[in-house]
Image (cartoon, rainbow, N blue to C red):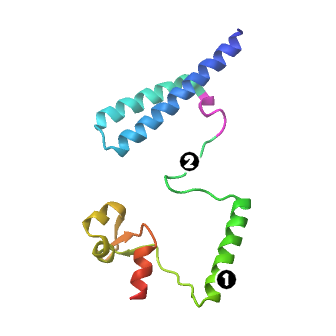
Amino acid sequence: MSETELKEEQKAALREEVRILGDTIRQLKAEKADPSEIKEKIARMLEKKALLGEDAAGGKMTLKCPKGTRDYGPKAMSVRSKVIDIVTECFKRHGAETIDTPVFELRDVLMGKYGEEGGKLVYDLADQGGEMLSLRYDLTVRTYHRLL
């Protein structure tokens, strides 16, 4: 085995260790683990990245989407738009109308529907006047609210 092959194997092993540590750190943060444990894992990951040097990412940047989301490329977006247009036209033929509502809602409206358990499902915001708002987490509450 040549020295170059050995280095590539070592780099691949280090990249895998960095990936595993990254996953572990995200999991610990999600579980709200002890901050000192998280810091220790981060320090270990940074050490591994330093050993990799400048090609830690292999010259490529990996973009990740937040959990529950995805990016649509041009081809997928074209298909998605056509499907949405077909469904929209079908609904309109049967008397439905389109509405557009904001992505945030008064916190009281969201909490009234789901109670305090619903508080785990929303992100709270405060406007400049101090009014409590929340980012909606689905379409159900805001659509229902508009129909009342």
**Residue drawn at the location 61% of the way across and 24% of the way down:** 12
**Residue drawn at the location 42% of the way across and 73% of the way down:** 104
Residue 60 shown left or right of residue 65 in the figure: right
Question: Which image quarter: residue 71?
Answer: bottom right
Q: Is residue 25 magenta?
A: no
Number of marks present in the image shown: 2
Q: Which residue is mark 2?
A: 64
* Residue at the outermost front position: 94
The three-letter amino acid code for the residue at tag 2 is Lys
**Residue drawn at the location 28% of the way across and 63% of the way down:** 117
From this view, report whether residue 8 is shown above or below residue 60: above
Residue 36 shown left or right of residue 103 in the figure: left
Residue extent of the magenta highlight: 54-60
Nearer-the-camera pick, 80 or 6: 80
> Would you call the spot at circle 1 few (<14 residues within 10 Å), some (14-19), or many (20 or more)?
some
Q: Which residue is mark 1?
A: 89
Horizontal and vertical percent for residue 94? 61, 88
Nearer-the-camera pick, 54 or 95: 95
Q: Is residue 59 magenta?
A: yes
SS label for mark 2: loop
